[in-house]
């Protein structure tokens, strides 16, 4: 076995002189010889995938059945699967992105032509997979592999809650079935959870967590402009290629756009990247870009051994998340940088992630009450019309409730129905415990930010309950902490010159707008034209100025007028508007009209108030989904003049846009009264998440 395992390692790695790292060969032997369930806790880059792929191949060569691997990272395991194929391992996946391949994979499984089947944890909730695929191979399985096993712990539920299903699956396994779990991050708290779930008699192979090649550093740079300037200045001299991590999709796009203006070859990589993901992964792998600016979509699983740096634009929420991400760097290099930049907005973002990780009691009560009133059940779109929650909040509530045992809800076709089971108090106890833990983790990361240079690796290892005595001094000098004031001014200008498109709505909501007798498609000649928003509400650049004007000063400053004039001049909509009007408000009757009047003067156009609010309604920001927002607007706007003062195109001004229903109805009213093209101009685009 020893000689064959070494040959497989060399085939998979592509290096004819490769040798096993400490613990790898022992872990493979443990699995092959069936010594019991094994948890491997080893640092990032150690080579955990070689353990399970080599073990799979050796078992298959000995005549055993296929292996099953459960991983949250199928989209990022291309390098590992390629290495497995070089060893002769026939790997296949069944996931939501390859439905056209399912029949072929199932046929090959039936013919015993697949050595290891890779699935996401969500497959374990799919009845078709359980009955038509897993049931057919369960008796022949030689090995169950659970990758990123820390997600089994309730510590990881907001990352992949379907990992909870593994606990039930493991309980039903034959006690002699080989089980291998792997992770890079498991402190004592998580280890206790894993032992409870994966036992009995779970053995642990735990290695040294120290990453000697990483030079870690932290800098507090409160403003986004300062951090953008720092990145641009360091990229001019920073050697090699790397990853910049951000907490939000918006920040990833913004940082990438800024660095592009500074002539650096970077690309954004997020959950919205879609089909370009693999192309961008390969571009970084082959050094065709300087860096990818990424969210956690490019986290665990991506393997580029010669990454020279990982930079965090904001502080992650936990040591576990940070160690996983910074561990992408320096796997095959003597020295690499891991730099964390701490900014003022990160606490708000982290607080939002923590507070939204679990549904509130009110959210659960609203969903269960709606289902109670619908004996035949409700689909998610139907729930949106009955519950004032966003689609994301409804889906999260349903997902977590459906994973309880016994579950209070069950799915029949596309509809969710109540079961006879009641939601246990344990659900709320778990939510409260984990919320408190995550707040402690967030505070721990703030302590990490405050450390002096040279103490960071030891802190991470202690936080993960490892042994910090092996830590050596950093191998590289710290990067400069000063920021070029000229670049800061350029970054401020960059943050203030971006604008966002406002796409017109082309269809009324389900059920229509009864007060306006409007339903179905909105005729093109009654739609708004594509509009513009100056900024994102509360964001760097103009976003904070808009928030300050609305809620602190009760007046939008002149520089916002100037910024809108510049945006409109660069935009130059055609046919050009010949007058200006605005969206009315009973709550703030003078705020938007005052701004719109000054903007009209600056554009040398006449201003006329022609729309009025018919009655008081809740603020649109209190409406959590599009159906509720549309219902809240229906009948609330009307023309306050007998005829429009002008027939030509018009700028329609408002302060905030979210669902676009207010702009849609206002434009529809204006066009219905023989108005010309309606071009929306809004100060800020808002939303319900960072």
Image (cartoon, rainbow, N blue to C red):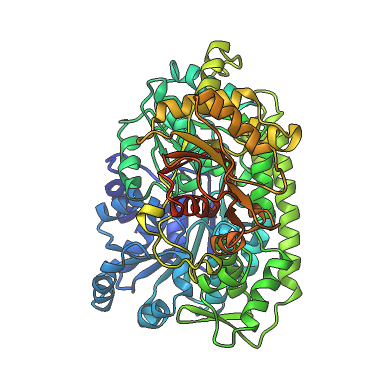
Please indicate, yes or no, whether residue 337 appears anywhere in the rendered image.
no
Residue under the image location 46 percent in, 42 percent down: 45
Residue under the image location 76 percent in, 74 percent down: 425
- In the rendered image, residue 303, in percent from the top left (x then y), is placed at 40, 43
* 41 to 168, vertically: above or below: above
Q: Front-most of 109 and 179? A: 109
- In the rendered image, residue 67, in percent from the top left (x then y), is placed at 38, 68
- Residue 306 left/right relative to 209: left
Q: Front-most of 306 and 18? A: 306
In the displayed orientation, state which residue is furthest to the front: 642
Please indicate, yes or no, whether residue 549 appears anywhere in the rendered image.
yes
Q: Front-most of 149 and 567? A: 567
Looking at the rendered structure, the number of numbered marks drawn on it comes to 0
- Residue 288 lies in what quarter of the image? top left
Residue under the image location 32 percent in, 54 percent down: 81
- Residue 511 left/right relative to 458: left
- In the rendered image, residue 220, in percent from the top left (x then y), is placed at 66, 25
Quadrant position of the N terminus in the picture: bottom left
* 426 to 348, vertically: above or below: below
């Amino acid at each position: 076995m020893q000689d064959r395992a070494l040959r497989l390692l060399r085939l998979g790695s592509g290096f004819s002189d490769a040798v096993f790292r400490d613990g790898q060969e022992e872990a493979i032997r443990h699995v092959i010889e069936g010594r019991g369930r094994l948890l491997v806790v080893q640092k990032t880059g150690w080579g955990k995938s070689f353990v399970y792929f080599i073990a799979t191949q050796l078992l298959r060569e000995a005549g055993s059945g296929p292996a099953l691997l459960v991983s949250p990272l199928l989209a990022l395991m291309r390098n590992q699967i390629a290495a497995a194929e070089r060893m002769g391992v026939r790997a296949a996946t069944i996931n939501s992105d390859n439905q056209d391949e399912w029949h072929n994979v199932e046929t090959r499984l039936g013919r015993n032509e697949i050595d290891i089947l890779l699935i996401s944890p969500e497959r374990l909730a799919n009845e078709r997979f359980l009955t038509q695929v897993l049931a057919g191979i369960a008796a022949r399985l030689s090995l169950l592999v659970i990758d990123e096993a820390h997600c089994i712990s309730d510590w990881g539920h907001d990352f992949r809650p379907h990992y909870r299903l593994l606990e039930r699956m493991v309980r039903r396994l034959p006690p002699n079935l080989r089980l291998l779990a792997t992770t890079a991050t498991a402190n004592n708290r998580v280890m206790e959870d894993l032992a409870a779930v994966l036992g009995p008699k779970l053995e642990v192979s735990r290695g040294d967590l120290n990453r000697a090649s990483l030079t870690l550093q932290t800098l507090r740079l409160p403003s986004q402009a300062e951090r953008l300037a720092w990145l641009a200045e360091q990229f001019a001299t920073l050697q090699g290629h790397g990853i910049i991590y951000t907490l939000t999709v918006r920040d990833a796009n913004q940082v990438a756009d800024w660095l592009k203006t500074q002539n650096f070859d970077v690309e954004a990589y997020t959950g919205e990247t879609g089909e370009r993901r693999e192309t961008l992964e390969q571009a970084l792998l082959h050094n065709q870009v300087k860096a990818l600016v990424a969210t956690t979509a490019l986290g665990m699983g991506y393997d580029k051994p010669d990454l020279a740096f990982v930079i965090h634009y904001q502080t992650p929420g936990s040591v576990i998340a940070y160690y996983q991400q910074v561990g992408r760097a320096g796997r095959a290099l003597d020295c690499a940088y891991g730099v964390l930049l701490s900014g003022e907005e990160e606490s708000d973002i982290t607080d939002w992630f923590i507070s939204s990780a679990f549904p509130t009691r009110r959210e659960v009560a609203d969903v269960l009450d709606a289902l109670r009133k619908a004996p035949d059940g409700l689909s998610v779109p139907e729930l949106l019309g009955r519950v004032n929650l966003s689609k994301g909040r409804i889906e999260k509530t349903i997902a977590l409730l459906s994973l309880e045992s016994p579950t209070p809800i069950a799915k029949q076709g596309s509809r969710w129905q109540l079961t006879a089971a009641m939601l246990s108090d344990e659900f709320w106890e778990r939510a409260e415990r984990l919320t408190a833990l995550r707040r402690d983790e967030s505070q721990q990361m703030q302590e990490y930010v405050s450390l002096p240079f040279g103490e960071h690796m030891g802190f991470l290892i202690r936080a993960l309950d490892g042994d910090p005595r092996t830590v050596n001094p950093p191998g590289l000098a710290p990067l400069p902490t000063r920021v070029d004031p000229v670049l800061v001014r350029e970054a401020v200008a960059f943050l203030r010159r971006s604008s966002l498109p406002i796409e017109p709505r082309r269809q009324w909501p389900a059920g229509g707008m009864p007060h306006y007798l409007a339903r179905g498609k909105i005729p093109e000649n009654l739609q708004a034209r594509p509009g513009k928003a100056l900024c994102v509400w509360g964001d760097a650049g103009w976003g904070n100025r808009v928030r300050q004007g609305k809620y602190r000063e009760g007046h939008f400053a002149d520089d916002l007028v100037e910024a809108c004039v510049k945006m409109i001049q660069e935009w130059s909509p055609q046919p050009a508007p010949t007058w200006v009007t605005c969206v009315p408000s009973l709550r703030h009757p003078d705020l938007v009209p005052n701004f719109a009047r000054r903007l009209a003067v600056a554009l040398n156009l006449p201003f006329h108030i022609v729309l009025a609010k018919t009655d008081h309604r809740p603020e649109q920001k209190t409406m959590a989904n599009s159906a509720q927002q549309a219902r809240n607007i229906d009948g609330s706007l009307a023309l306050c003049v007998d005829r429009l003062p002008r027939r030509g195109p018009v700028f329609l001004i408002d302060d905030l846009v979210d669902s676009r229903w207010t702009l849609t109805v206002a434009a529809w009213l204006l066009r219905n009264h023989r108005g010309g093209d309606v071009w929306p101009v809004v100060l800020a685009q808002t939303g319900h998440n960072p």
